[in-house]
Every structure is written in C-alpha cells, then in structure tokens.
Image (cartoon, grey):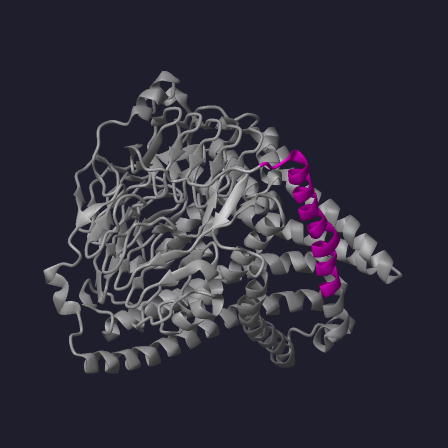
Amino acid sequence: MRNGEYVLCGALQLLFLLGYPALTTIVAVKGYEWVSAGPHPIDIYLRAVAYGSAMFLGLCCLPIMLKWLLVGRWKPQQIRVWSMAYFRFWLVKTLVQRNPMALFVGSPLYGLYLRALGAKVGRGAVIFSRNVPVCTDLLSIGEGAVIRKDSFFNGYRAHNGVIQTGTVSLGKDALVGEMTMLDIWTSLGDGAKLGHSSSLHAGQAVPDGERWHGSPAQPTDVDCQRIPTMDVSTRRRVVFSTVQLVNLLLVGTPLMFVVAVLALTKIPQLVTLTAAGSVSFTSWAFYRDDALVISAVSFFGALLVGLVFVGTVPRVLNLFIKPDKVYPLYGFHYWIHRAIARMTNSKFYLNLFGGTSYVIHYLRWLGYDLRGVRQTGSNFGEMVKHDTPFLSAVGSGTMVADGLSIINADFSNTSFRLSRVSIGAENFLGNLIAYPAQGKTGDNCLLATKVMVPVDGQVREGMGLLGAPSFEIPRSVKRDKHLDVESKDELRRRLRAKNVYNTISMALFLLARWLLIFLVTTFYLAAIDLWASLGAFAFALATAGVFVGTVVYNVLVDRMIIPLQALRPQGCSIYDRAFWRHERFWKVTTLGYVLLFNGTPLKNVIWRLLGVRIGRRVFDDGLRIPERTFTTIGDDCTFNVDTVIQCHSQEDGGFKSDHIVIGAGCTLGVGTLVHYGVTMGDGAVLATGSFLMKGEEMPPHALWGGNPAKKMREQSADLQLRRNGLDDRADVLVRGD
C-alpha cells in the first residue's frame, strides 16, 4: 500500500465532493435567473417547466453516461483500494447512488434506470430497497422477482484492501425478504424465496422453488410470502410512471421556482439584500436581523407545521385503505400507501422524541395503537419505522431499542396488502429487528439484536429468542437483576427525574440543529448579498462553505458533548444519571454527515477527530460507531456498507457498555454488527450479515460468520474467485495500475 496513492485518492475525492454540488448550484442559479426573467406568470411557469425538465434529465443522464465512459461494463475483477481504478469505481458509485432516479424505488421507472446502467431486469420485477446496486452489469433480476426494502445486493464487496465484484442473480418470481444481504456470487432460482433478516454468503445458491432463511441462509419450510397475485397490465405501469413524472416536472419543479421567486421578492430581509449596493454581511445587523430571524422562523415554523401535518394528512389518506384487503400495485391505493409511509416515517421527529417519555405521545399522534402502555421513559429508541402507523400496536411495558422495522405490508410482483402488527406486552426488542405481521411472539419475550422473528408454529411467550433462524434463550439473566429498580415509589421518582433530564436533552437537540440551520442560512444570505458582484459563483462558494462548515460544526458539537458519555465501561439502570448522560450524547450528536465520506480517507480523519483510535489506511465503506471513544481499530482494516460497531447494549431496564478492539487487517462484511466487549485478532474476517456477540474473542486470521457468529469453513465464493482468475494472492490480477 503506497501512502502517495492514499493521499492522492483522498484529494481527488474531496475535490469532487466540493466541486460537484458547487457546479450543480451554479447551474441551478443560472436557471433561476432565466426563469425569473419571464415577463408574465404563464411565461415564468413554462420556463420553470422547461428548465426543470432539462436539469432533471441532465442529472439523471450524467451518472449513466459517466458509468459507461469510465467503466464500460462491470466484470468480475478485483480493484485495489486507493488506486486510480478505485477512484473511478468510487466516482461512478457515488453518482449512481445519488441519481434522482434512485427516488423512484418501487416504481417501474426504477427498473428502467437499472437497465440503463446495464442490469438485466425482467418484466414485472419490483424493487423496494433504496440501497442502489453498483455493479449493475453483474446483476440479473428475473421476471416478476420482488426485492423488499432495506436489502443489499451491491454486486461488490470490500475484502482485505481490495474491491471484489461478482454476480448476483435472481430467477423468475424470486423473492428477497426485508433486511437481507446478498453477497457476490449468490443466486436465487426461479420461484425461490429468501426470508426476512437473512443473508446469502458468498457462493451460496438457492435452488428453484426452495425457501431459505437465516444467516447464512439454510433450507426451510416457512413461507415468508402469503399474498395472492393480481392482474396488472402494462398500461397500468405506464400510466403510474407517467403520473409520477408529470407530478415532478409540471408541479413539483415549478413550485420550487415559485417559492424561490416569492422568497426573494416578498421577504423584506431578502429584498434588502438583493437591492443593496454594498456588502451587508460584514455588519452585525446582517446576522441579527437577517440570518437569525430567517433561520429561527424557518426552523421552528417548519417544526410545528410538520408536526401538525404528519398527524393529520396521513389520517385523511388512511380512510381510503382497508386492512387485509389485497390491492393491485401502481394504482390509487398504492400511491396512498406510499404517501402515508413517507409522511409518517420522519427521522427528525423520532430523533427528537425517541428515548424519552414523549415518544409514546408522538407515536400515538401518528396513529400507533398504544392504549394502556406503561411509561418507562425509554419505550422506543430513536430509529423506528413502519409501513403504516395505523396498523401498528405495542403492548404495555414493552421497550424497543433502535432499528425496529414494523412490516405491515406484504407484496407480490403485482399486489400488496396492509395488515396489523401487534407486539406483545412486557417485551424487550434489541437493535435492527424486522417484525412482520405474521410474527409468532406474544408477551414477556426478549428479542435479541438482529433476531429473525419466527413466523411459524405456536406463539412464543415467556422466553428469549436469538439468532437467524432464531432459537430459545433465557428471558433474563440473574446477574443483571441488580440493574432493576424494585420499588415502585423509587421508580416513579427516578422516572420524573429522567423526564426532566430528557426534556433538557431535547432542548439541546433543537438548539444544536437550529444553530446548524443558522450557519447554512448565513452562508446563503451572504451569497445573495454578493450575487450582484460575483453572480452564481457566490452560491457555489456558499455551497462549498456549507459542506465544510457542517463537518466542522458537527465535530465541535460531538467533542463538546463527549464528556456527557458514560466514558467508563459499566452496567447501570436506565434510571441512573450515567445512562441519561449517555442518551444525551446520542441525541445531540449525529453521524449522518460522516456517511457522506464513505469510501474515502477523509472519513478516517473525521473518526479521529471524533475520538476513535483508528489506524492508518483503513477502508471504510459505511461504518457506524455510536460510542467513538470506546473503539480501537488497527491499520489496514476493511469495513463494508452498513457495518456497525456498537459498544453498548440495553436490555429491559439495564444498560451495559464496554470497549471494542478491532485488530489490524480485519474485514467486516456488509451488514455486520459487532457488540460490546469484543476483541478481533489481526486479519480476522466477519462474513456478510453476521452478528458478533458481546465478549467474543476472535483469534487472528479467523473466519467467522452467522447470527450469532461462529467459526466457519472457507467460503465457497473464494473458490469461485479463483475459478474466475481472481485469486487475491496473485498480485498481477489485482487491478488498479
């Protein structure tokens, strides 16, 4: 590994991350100038439609053209990270995944987009996952196949410092469940089904007509799809796609231009800036009267209006949906379902209310059935989503950690149905759980992190479930009993204290987000102020300033809040102040901006600034670390998309945390999760979709996988790689020169 390549690649990536948004901003401003120059309202509207359509077409076509120009057809190969070949790979991946066409997931238009990128997508195939595949020429999706949301089928993986590309093949009428991972060199035959929360490890193939589930997947008799198909004509697909484009190009885009014109001509502060003959942003009044007022009104006004909106409009739309009724895709009811799901799955409000007593009231406002729920102060975390809130119910005393996905919807390639999901009372649900409508768990259950919820057999009660496929474990552990609060009076007192503490945390959350909006507003108001002298270039500078300023601001917030974290490994009650401080750290800080730097050396720099003890030349394609200062990572490690290093665990009323040490040269596969107290020896590999449980110690150069993870034999995909002439021990075949 040459350090010069590492630095050069990072510099080129930074140049793109700053330059591409700035260039797009210049084009948008030039378009605004042309549109707003129209002499009449009708002329302005027609110009907005014409320019908006042209810009949309350009933004959609540019990534496709660059893919064919820079890469051509993807082939099975290995690309050394940080090489120029890798930079081309990263550039194409970034553009392809940020293409506006990626917004049309679940629409026939999305299949057309993948075909334009070289994928083989059969007629009637439906894709609901927003995780856009990269190596599309190696992707084959048969007629009528269905890929559910939150699934990964990238066509590549990172392993030991190289990018390995390989085929992913789905046969006719195949089904991929939710929260599943398909590694390279995997396939499902015609009519094959892969259950929720499962993974196919590299080289695995599901034969025609068989049902598999688990991690790694294995044959099963359980059917994860129980919905009849309907007749959906080509005409229906075309009409639905046409309406989507018409809404975007004839309504949505012109509306944005109208809002911009009204803002610059009606808001007094903006009118003053555009008319000013001298620079205003050097005066105190600019920040007090302009940036402060506009940012505060915009942020807190949108906060209140949005809160009213998500609790009212979806309720009206829900009147048109009947539970358990089968509807055809690409019709009025399908549009209603998509609108409700998008409106009610607000990450902002869940970040605000999650982990506090207020989240119960917020979810009720959305439509959840939480009648009789006992307040615990931590009933739900900050990451909960659903297909519809109006058919989601949770029993009293149940607590849910982050990452719960309530699966109300069942899909075939032509139909969908919404059903009630009921989670029992006195449960505890760990992280990253997909809970389907057919879930067979009742009261007093512990559902461990990444567990596959059983959908067959009798209803499980009074037990714990772990793994994929799941198996029984004790509901609770005696050694954790000391973390409970036994007295009801003491519990009420501590809950009141927790509510006060959490209310302050919510206020700090809003303050931190508003200050960021204030920063962004200041940059763009300064650009408006300089518009007359610098033109569109002023907005390009503002966009670059917002990008850099957002990173600097969030790093500073993180460093200021770190002392609130429970910095020493410990176990405590959720009603202990140490846990409340830890919750405040989670709430006020954010990692959203860090993920913008996936696959770049810049992300390692940010991790260091956030307190991670991280080695040199680490390749990070999508790692998340909730507790940065608890984590140690060695040199030359490789992290794939959607990997998590989680140095804590919450179970019922107890909270525990510990350090995690990842040795040099380790590889974590797509969708893996490493729990607290883990040590991975140098060169160890954790396979796709695996869950490495608390306290495990992986020996150096070991290969582990599964949920829960354990020692594995050599993966069959490694043999496949050698058959294709891609043995990673043959240096001449590692591309990148």
Q: Position of residue 30 (x, y in %)?
A: 75, 54
Relative to 188, 94 lies left or right: right
**Is residue 83 something that shows in the picture?**
yes
Was residue 428 drawn as part of the magenta stretch in this picture? no
**Is residue 1 something that shows in the picture?**
no
Was residue 233 drawn as part of the magenta stretch in this picture? yes
Q: Quadrant of the N terminus?
A: top left
Q: Position of residue 300 (x, y in %)?
A: 55, 75
79 or 635, which lies in front?
Answer: 79
Could you say which quadrant of the image residue 681 lies in? top left
Q: Position of residue 499 (x, y in %)?
A: 33, 78
Q: Is residue 492 above or below residue 459?
A: below
Could you say which quadrant of the image residue 487 lies in? bottom left
Relative to 283, 559 lies left or right: left
Q: Position of residue 409 (x, y in %)?
A: 46, 49
Tell me the magenta residue range. Answer: 231-260
Q: Residue furthest right?
A: 39
Relative to 183, 575 lies left or right: left
502 or 179, which lies in front?
Answer: 179
* Callout count: 0
Q: Is residue 702 above or below residue 393?
A: above
Q: Is residue 219 above or below residue 559?
A: above
662 or 658, which lies in front?
Answer: 658
Q: How would you classify the magenta stretch by its main secondary structure?
A: helix
Q: Is residue 239 above or below residue 479?
A: above
Q: Residue at x 22, y 78 (%)?
A: 491
Relative to 228, 334 lies left or right: right
